[in-house]
Amino acid sequence: MPTISTSPSIADALQIIWHPHPTLRRKSLSLTRVDAELKRIAERMFELMYSSNGIGLAANQVGLPLRMFVMNLAGKKGEGEEIVVLNPVLSKPRGNESMEEGCLSLPGIYYEVTRPRYITIDAYTITGDPIQAELDGMLSRCVQHEVDHLDGVLFIDRVAESVRKQVDAELEEFEVDFDSRRNTGSIGSDAEIEKYCQEIEQRYCRTT
Ligand code: CO
């Protein structure tokens, strides 16, 4: 009789994490291997992104400290183009543009952020094909926001000094909510989160 694997799936358990979850501040490591589970993880990230009406989602926003993000500027399944980006490197920033941003890890918070208008990206698709492009507009904006995530940076770190106090007051509500969810056990301790991150890094980021 065939047996069915009962090993726990990483993908099935993923949920979007909110500020101030520590994995949002972890610098994600480059991927050195791709497996079938990583493809399921990317699929699950698209599902979570669409159900929260987002256009981009970084792996560490679902608790995985990996240099990967998913994106679809149309924000709807079956529309636009789904892009999975691995190990992105940005270069040649040019110009300046201010635009309102939001984030699935900070629902309900929107502020203007100034970033370079143009950026060059070098990266890989999940099937190992190289990506090289000069970006402009929403694509440039979204990619810069997601790569910030991989470096542990949130868009609220980049707001104007004039709105800093207002932002901090809004963040405090998230911090109170985080503490209460941790007290009820729905979010693990820092040590448990660290152990999980190391297991993920061991699986996908080994260099030997
Ligand atoms: Co975000």
Image: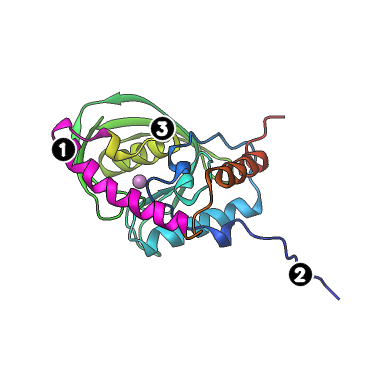
Q: Which residue is mark 2?
A: 4
Residue 100 appearing in the image: no
Q: Secondary structure at mark 2?
A: loop
In this view of the protein, which residue sits in the foreground, 10 or 90? 10
In this view of the protein, which residue sits in the foreground, 32 or 196? 196
* Lower sequence index among marks 2 and 3: 2
Q: Is residue 156 above or below residue 179?
A: above
The type of residue carrying mark 1 is Val
Q: Which residue is mark 1?
A: 163
* Lower sequence index among marks 1 and 3: 3
Assign the N terminus to one quadrant of the image: bottom right
Left/right placement of residue 3 relative to residue 97 reads: right
Instruction: Verify CB contact (< 8 Å) between mark 2 and mark 3.
Output: no
Task: Using the numbered discs, state the Cα–Cα distance from disc 2 to disc 3 in whole angstroms.
Answer: 41 Å
Magenta extent: 158-183
* Residue farthest to the front, as pictured: 183
The type of residue carrying mark 2 is Ile
Is residue 182 highlighted in magenta? yes
Assign the C terminus to one quadrant of the image: top right
* Lower sequence index among marks 1 and 2: 2
